Amino acid sequence: MMAKGTLYGVGVGPGDPELLTVKAYRVMKESPVIAYPRKRKGSKSYAYAIAEQYIDQREKEMLGLVFPMTKDKDILEREWNNTVDEVYERLSQGKDVAFITEGDPMLYSTFIHMMRLMQEKYPEVKVVSIPGISSINGVASRLGLPLADGDEHVAVVPATEEREKMKQALLTHDCVVFLKVAKVIDMMVDLLAELDLLSKASVVTKVTSGEEVIWPNVAELKGLELEYLTLMVVRK
């Protein structure tokens, strides 16, 4: 029987192509299949845009995987199974597959579910994670803002409508990074004002990329529609 290929989860960093690691570059160069997430057929992805300049498409099979933006469990289960089967088809031919993802593959990444389902359905497949620089590290450097020092506590929190949980995160940590904050920006601005923390907050979209936008005055964001890849840092 032909040996199975290896599935690599490759973190390509937060946005700046120069923040791609040497190991990530090597794995992409050596893998005959480059898989990447996209919202719909025919579209690229943020991860693809970051890594594109390092990939010779004449030598690779570019496998765009569509992940539907829905909460319907039946649709999600069906499409996820189809996606894993599609990747396994290449692995079963002995081909290594590099699944590229922005940031780090083990931190709020699409690759996490890919890995779990692959291991569940096809446990014989070897899965390897190649760590990448996350948006959390990227925003700290861009703002010149230490996330934690000495005995300080830092939290990484997905921003949600659960106001009390967001409040407790702010009250109990020295620094909080709120991920994907765009959908609740109005609530977060009001909460910061309540806690007298507006001056301690910054908001950044697509950090380190060519499309990066930094808002040091978060109060002016109320009522605005922000990009999906937007985070907030609050440092007391």
Image (cartoon, grey):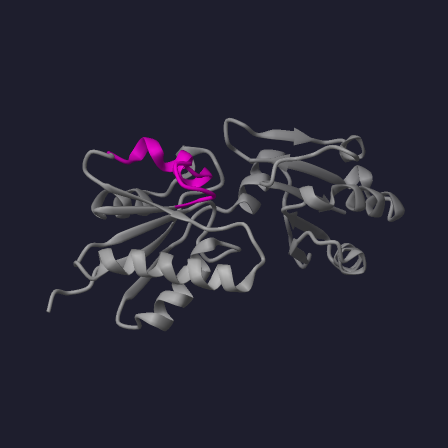
Residue 10 higher or lower than 42, as above or below: below
Q: Residue at x 75, y 54 (%)?
A: 161
- Please give left or right for residue 34 compared with residue 76 in the image: left
In the picture, residue 120 is in which quadrant?
A: bottom left
Give the image location of residue 111, x and y in percent. 43, 56
Name the outermost residue toward the left. Answer: 1
Q: Is residue 206 above or below residue 78?
A: above
Residue depicted at x 17% and y 59%: 94
Query: Which residues fall within the magenta stretch?
Result: 37-56
Front residue of this view, candidates 65 and 160: 65
Relative to 3, is 136 on the left or the right? right
Left or right: residue 193 compared with residue 204 = right
- x, y (%) of residue 35? 33, 47
* Residue depicted at 50% across the width and 59% down the height: 75
The answer to whether residue 41 is magenta is yes
In terms of depth relative to the viewer, which is nearer, 72 or 156? 72
Is residue 60 within the magenta segment? no
Give residue 29's position: percent from left, percent from top.
24, 42
